[in-house]
Image (cartoon, helix red, strand yellow):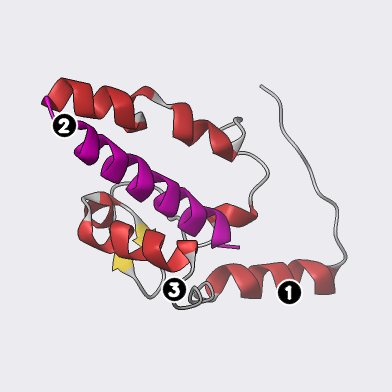
Amino acid sequence: MRLRVFVESDSAFQRWVDQQRAAPATPAKGSPADAGQQVFRRSACIGCHTIAGVAQGKVGPDLSHVGGRATIAGRCPQYHRDAAPLDPERAVAEAGRLDAAAERVAQDLDALIAYLQSLK
């Protein structure tokens, strides 16, 4: 197993702790991250994941500052766009939807990723 270790001064570590305890910044109105927050709020994501000030799920990991991480479970965060359960073309094909629906799923997924990446 590979681990990354960061050595910080006591004061730098305390600043990091304080930041992790605080809610993430609210996305700018009309931004891709704002659209992604709306997707997050209306999707099943809120049932499992916590984002401070947005959702209080208890089953999945806390995503409050996920955009500030270099890796997630040892992987680059951008892998989510290609993950099979989140692949919009696959999801639409399996659901038998039309092309317009596929485009909407892709747009929602891109917005959701922009939101998650903004959570620093």
Badge 1 marks a residue whose secondary structure is helix
Q: Residue at x 34, y 49 (%)?
A: 108
Whether residue 101 appears in magenta in the rendering, the answer is yes
Residue type, mark 1 in image: Arg
Main SS of residues in magenta: helix
Q: Is residue 101 above or below residue 28?
A: above
Label number found at residue 56: none
Gap between marks 2 and 3 measured at Cα: 27 Å
Seen from the viewer's position, the closer of residues 31 and 77 is 31
Q: Over which residues does the magenta segment extend? A: 96-120
Quarter of the image for residue 12 reads bottom right
Q: Residues within 10 Å of mark 2 (few under 14, many from 20)?
A: few
Q: Which residue is mark 1?
A: 15
Work out whether mark 2 precedes mark 3 in sequence or the reverse, and give the earlier one: 3
Q: Element under label 3? A: loop
Residue, far left: 96
Dot 1 or dot 2: first in sequence order is 1
Closer to the observer: label 3 or label 1?
3
User: What residue is pinned by disc 2?
Assistant: 98
Image quarter of the N terminus? top right
Task: Tell us which disc is closer to us: 2 or 3.
Answer: 2
